Each structure stands twice: as C-alpha cells, then as structure tokens.
Image (spheres, helix red, strand yellow):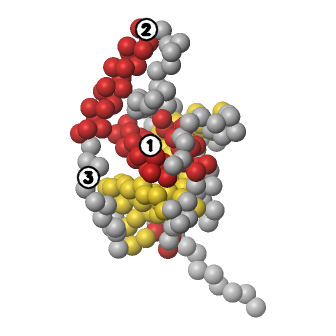
Amino acid sequence: MTQNIPKLEPKPDAAIQQINLSYNAEQDRLLFRVGLNDNSELLVWLTSRITKMIWQLLNGETSIPTATSIQAETLPQQAVAQFKQEMQTVETLQKMDFATEYQPRPEVRNDGAMLAINALLIQTENKQSTLELPCLEGVTVRMNLNQVLILAICNMLKLTTKEAGWDLGASAQTQVQVTLAADAGEKKILH
C-alpha cells in the first residue's frame, strides 16, 4: 500500500518589515524573529556558536565600535579613518528605531521555531549579500541584506549577547564561511 504524502509548496519570498532578537535564559539561546510583509513571521533559535558565526560574518561589513576595534598597533592614519567610520555608524544607529515593540504576526512559517545549525554569507558578483541559516528541520532561511539590515542585526547581536553574558570575540575554533557565487553552478568556500 502506498501512502499519498501531500507535497509542501514553498512559500513565496516576502519582504522584511521588522526584526527582533531576544535572549531566552531557560534555553540559553537567542530567538531571532523576522516579521514579514505577508503578515507571517519566521522564528529561528540561535545558539552561542551560531551567534558568533553570524557576528563574524556580518561585523566585517559594519564599523560598530567595540572595546577592541582600534588596536594599539594601528597606525594613526588608519585609526583616524576607522574612528570616522565608527562615528558614521553610530549616527546611523541613532536614526534607527530600536524602541518600537516587535509586533508578532498571526502566522508563523514552518509551524514554529527552527534551530539554526550553520551560518553562511553568500555574496554575488554584483555585491548583493544573503545570509543563509540552514536549520535542523531541513529548511534554510535566506535573508537578502543591505547595509542598514546588517547594521541593525549586528547592533541587536551586540546588545542581546551582552544580556546573555556571551562573548562575541573571535575564537580560533569558530570557522567562518563566506561563499562566493561567481558561477551559479559552482560554489567556492573560503575558510
């Protein structure tokens, strides 16, 4: 006897309207919520390891000031240039709305929170960046990124991991992958 298993149709892409990142002390994980314009949301659990990977992938795309962002051995001209970039970043962050409360959507895609097991930053030839979060449930969450979204995610990671007591510093054991999609059929992975 064969059983007819209904084929699940992929949901169409939707634009991001709101994002939220919160720490769940009971699970010792971050819950990343992405509110979409089709009145649905994605829920993705991020472990400390995955959070560090995302930070390392995206923080290089921003100039968020940290206690160690300018090293003692940095040449004065480079330090001044980096300081100016960090000041522009701070000004941009001040214009963003981090005070409005996240509005949960009535429909949750994939019937609940998924657990991210990896983080990849895909960059096309035209410099478009996509964050991919393959999940344990067999679904990959893909987010097309622009500079404002990258900056918002990095700022939220910095604030939320401070609340969690996690260190976002570079770790020798953490392996970061950037995939260059130069050829649609071939993926090159840099470690």
Query: Position of 96 compared to 107: left or right?
Result: left
Which of the labelled discs sits on residue 76, or is there none?
2
Q: Is residue 64 above or below residue 122?
A: above
Which of the labelled discs sits on residue 171, or is there none?
none
Q: Residue furthest right?
A: 1
Which of the labelled discs sits on residue 99, or is there none?
3
User: Foreground: 62 or 64?
Assistant: 64
In 3D space, how far apart are the residues under numbered discs 1 and 2 (Cα atoms)?
Answer: 27 Å
x and y percentages locating residue 56 in the rendered image:
55, 37
In 3D space, how far apart are the residues under numbered discs 3 and 2 (Cα atoms)?
Answer: 36 Å
User: Which amino acid type is shown beneath numbered disc 2?
Assistant: Pro
User: Which amino acid type is shown beneath numbered disc 3?
Assistant: Ala
Q: For label 1, count other residues whose C-alpha is less than 10 Å away and answer few (under 14), some (14-19) or many (20+).
A: some
The residue positioned 53% from the left and 66% from the top of the image is: 26
The residue positioned 38% from the left and 67% from the top of the image is: 40
The residue positioned 63% from the left and 81% from the top of the image is: 5
Task: Give whichever of discs 1 and 2 has the lower sequence position.
Answer: 2
Residue pointed to by mark 1: 158
Q: SS of the residue at dot 2?
A: helix
Dividing the picture into quarters, in which one does residue 183 lie? top right
